[in-house]
């Protein structure tokens, strides 16, 4: 049996996945996420505390969190721009 393998990676044009109406990560405050206790619900961000970064709108629950994100974006932004890494190994 002759088996060949193929790897496929799909990349979208936008660097950060952003919902049209909710913004990046569905409008969740990514800074607040890191201080949540186990089983706690995500904290929704507000239009009042927005930040534009990499063509996406990020929302935060406070000015303090917005500022923390703006000063250290790579620390808080999701890996792979919020996309699920899709690496498919197919047998042809």
Image (cartoon, rainbow, N blue to C red):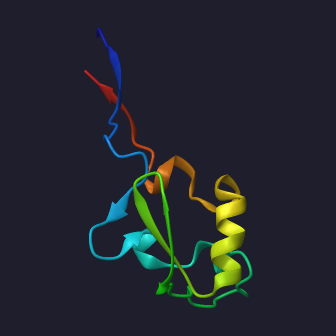
Q: Picture coordinates of residue 75 (x, y %)?
A: 70, 57
Q: Residue furthest top?
A: 2
Q: Is residue 68 above or below residue 47?
A: above
Q: Is residue 59 above or below residue 89?
A: below
Q: Is residue 39 left or right of residue 12?
A: right
Residue at 72% across, 70% down:
68
In the depicted view, which residue is nearer to us: 64 or 81?
64
Q: Picture coordinates of residue 83 (x, y %)?
A: 42, 52
Residue at 67% across, 78% down:
65
Q: Residue furthest bottom?
A: 40
Q: Is residue 82 above or below residue 59?
A: above
Quarter where residue 43 is shown: bottom right
Q: Is residue 15 left or right of residue 34?
A: left
Look at the image and tell me in which quarter the C terminus lies.
top left
Q: Is residue 12 above or below residue 81?
A: above
Q: Picture coordinates of residue 2 (x, y %)?
A: 29, 8
* Total tally of numbered discs in the picture: 0
Residue at 71% across, 81% down:
64
Look at the image and tell me in which quarter the N terminus lies.
top left
Q: Is residue 40 left or right of residue 17?
A: right
In the depicted view, which residue is nearer to us: 82 or 59?
59
Quarter where residue 66 is shown: bottom right
């Amino acid at each position: 049996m002759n088996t060949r393998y193929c790897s496929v990676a799909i990349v979208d044009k936008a660097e950060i996945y952003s919902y049209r109406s909710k913004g990046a990560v569905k409008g969740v405050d990514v800074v607040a996420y890191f201080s949540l206790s186990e089983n706690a619900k995500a904290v929704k961000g507000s239009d009042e505390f927005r930040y534009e970064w990499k063509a996406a709108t990020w929302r935060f629950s406070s000015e303090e969190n917005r500022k923390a994100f703006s000063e250290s974006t790579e620390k808080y932004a999701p890996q792979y721009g919020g996309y699920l890494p899709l690496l498919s190994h197919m047998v042809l």
